[in-house]
Amino acid sequence: MHDGLFLLNKPAGVSSRGYGIELKRKFGLKKVGHAGTLDLEATGLLLVLSGRALKLQNYLLDGSKVYSGNILLGVSSDTDDVHGNCIATIDAEHKLKQIVQDEVLEKIKQKFSPSYNQRPSLVSSKKINGVSSRILVQQGITPELKENFVQLEFEELDFKNFNELFYKVRVSKGFYVRALARDIGELLGVGGVAQTINRDEVNPYKLDEAVNLDKFESQENVTIEDLGASYKPLNQLSSLMPYQRVMLIDQAEIGAFRSGNKAILDVIKARKVEDENPEIFYSIVDCSENFLGMVSIEDNIPSFKFVF
């Protein structure tokens, strides 16, 4: 059984779940799940886990993410992207061409970077009592979504023309690109929607390592080995998790960890790297760098999240 992480380059027009199922069928995997949903029309890096690696699903997304694409100005929609129902339009070119573009870009950066309180899009995966906002809207319910504190760094931001902005942003967990497009449009007084969204990175994983499954469409008898670097076996994932690693050096320590012995706290304390922002989660490895599991420490109490 292939327990591990698959880095996929999702095309537009297929759901994240559907693309994971396509991977499952193509390579004969028993159980898969994705970490971090991409919208149906969004493209780019999709993380899919299989087997025992599914335990990592909630932890892979703690790192920063990078998105790039275009924002269309002068339009507002009920989904905050070009695929929704148009609510309003305005002649953005007429309004914005009277303003110095560099001043507009600086205004956007000062407003939203390095952080701001963001209201998620109504048609999003944001959950209310366990149900996504998208599903509630489909049921005719308009949920009240609270603002989230998010962090944002503009790696690139420039006008393609008076109606379009190109963006490349590094963002924190819980960030919605469509909401940023809406908020930029509101700031400029013209409305805005996400035209394209591409995920370039989920730290530390990058899109250039990912594979598009279309590559194997006409091939028969493909194997996991054909995926190359886009497949990361479970025992190698500790070095690719956004947490500090702690190495256990003998079988006694490994046994204590696997049995849930709280004495392992002293081992972690002795070997972790101290810094100004102490870690909560730790990846536990053996001397061969094999991933053994994860533990969190809060109020000096260890909590064993999972053990392999």
Image (cartoon, rainbow, N blue to C red):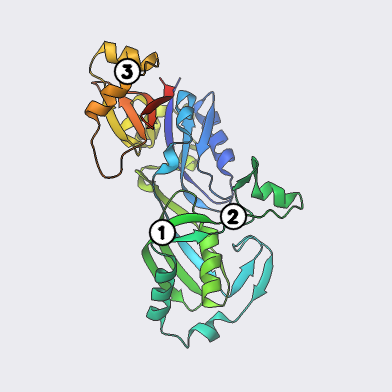
Taking depth in this image into account, of 24 and 248 the one nearest to the observer is 248
Whichever of labels 1 and 3 marks the residue nearer the N terminus, that label is 1
Where is residue 196? Give x, y as percent: 51, 60
Q: 195 or 26: which is nearer to us?
A: 195
Q: Which residue is mark 1?
A: 152
CB contact under 8 Å: marks 1 and 2: no
Q: Quadrant of the C terminus?
A: top left
Counting from the top left corner in percent of width and height, residue 18 is at 59, 39
Residue lying at the far right in this picture: please name it. 140
Q: CA distance from mark 2 to mark 3?
A: 41 Å
User: In 3D space, how far apart are the residues under numbered discs 1 and 3 (Cα atoms)?
Assistant: 39 Å
Please name the amino acid that badge 3 sits on: Ala
Label 1 vs label 2, nearer the camera: 2
| Mark 1 or mark 2, earlier in chain | 2
Query: Left or right of 250: which side holds 18?
Result: right
Residue 146's disc is 2
Nearer to us in this view, 11 or 284: 284
Mark pair 1, 2: CA separation: 18 Å
**Tag of residue 263:** 3
| Amino acid type at image mark 2 | Lys
Residue 15 visible, this orientation = yes
Q: Choose top left, top right, bottom left or bottom right for residue 154.
A: bottom left
Mark 3, secondary structure of its residue: loop
Answer with left or right where residue 300 lies relative to residue 144. Answer: left
Query: In the displayed image of the protein, which residue is found farthest to the front?
Result: 299
